[in-house]
Image (cartoon, rainbow, N blue to C red):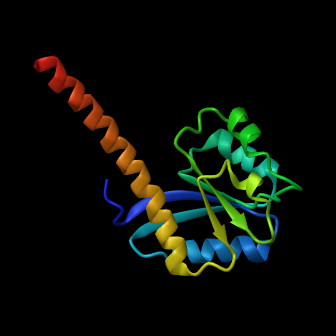
Amino acid sequence: MSTNNQSLKIVVAEASIIIRSGVSAVLKRIPNLDIHPIEVNSVEALSHYAHLHQPDMVIINPSFDGWFNLPAFKAEHPRLTGVKYIALISSVTNNNVLKDYDERFSICDDLDIIAAKLNGLLRGDEEEKDNESDTLSQREKDRKS
């Protein structure tokens, strides 16, 4: 799957409307990606969306609703396999809190940095799929010899 004009559903979970709408605006400006941001302003809204839809990525402030418990959210929504979780850093945050996230954005990052990080996550998905097919191919080769 090529990243050119790839359509992505990205949830932006942030209490501040200024930050949330700003992140959504930036996402729409990323070249070669057709991003559809979905803005949520509460954990309840995020949970509701997650029950009804399958986002590709979730950008969430780790201090969302006091402190967002990502492992508990993943456990509560087991069907959201393959979803990438990106921490949106707007204040000093303990690195231990960030260990469960796939990537992190700072509110100080520019468009190029954000685009590079998103494309890196997408390439990671493609490489995992390639590695899985390589492994299967290797098994098939071993079986034939």
Q: Residue furthest right?
A: 66
User: Which residue lies at the image location 64% right of the left edge and 41% below the top edge?
Assistant: 52
Task: Using the image, determine if residue 117 lies above or below residue 22.
Answer: above
Q: Quadrant of residue 22?
A: bottom right
Give the percent coordinates (x, y) of residue 112.
49, 79
Q: Residue furthest left?
A: 145
Counting labels gives 0
Give the percent coordinates (x, y) of residue 3.
36, 62
User: Which residue lies at the image location 77% right of the left edge and 57% below the top edge?
Assistant: 62
User: Which residue lies at the image location 59% right of the left edge and 39% below the top edge?
Assistant: 80
Tell me if 142 is positioned left or right of 92 in this view.
Answer: left
Tell which of 28 and 110 is nearer to you: 110
Q: Quadrant of the C terminus?
A: top left
Task: Using the image, determine if residue 57 lies above or below residue 144.
Answer: below
Tell me if 2 is positioned left or right of 11 in this view.
Answer: left
User: Does residue 29 appear in the picture of this structure?
Assistant: no
Task: Using the image, determine if residue 29 lies above or below residue 102.
Answer: below
Give the percent coordinates (x, y) of residue 106.
67, 72
Give the percent coordinates (x, y) of residue 24.
62, 71
Q: Quadrant of residue 98?
A: bottom right
Tell me if 85 is positioned left or right of 142 in this view.
Answer: right
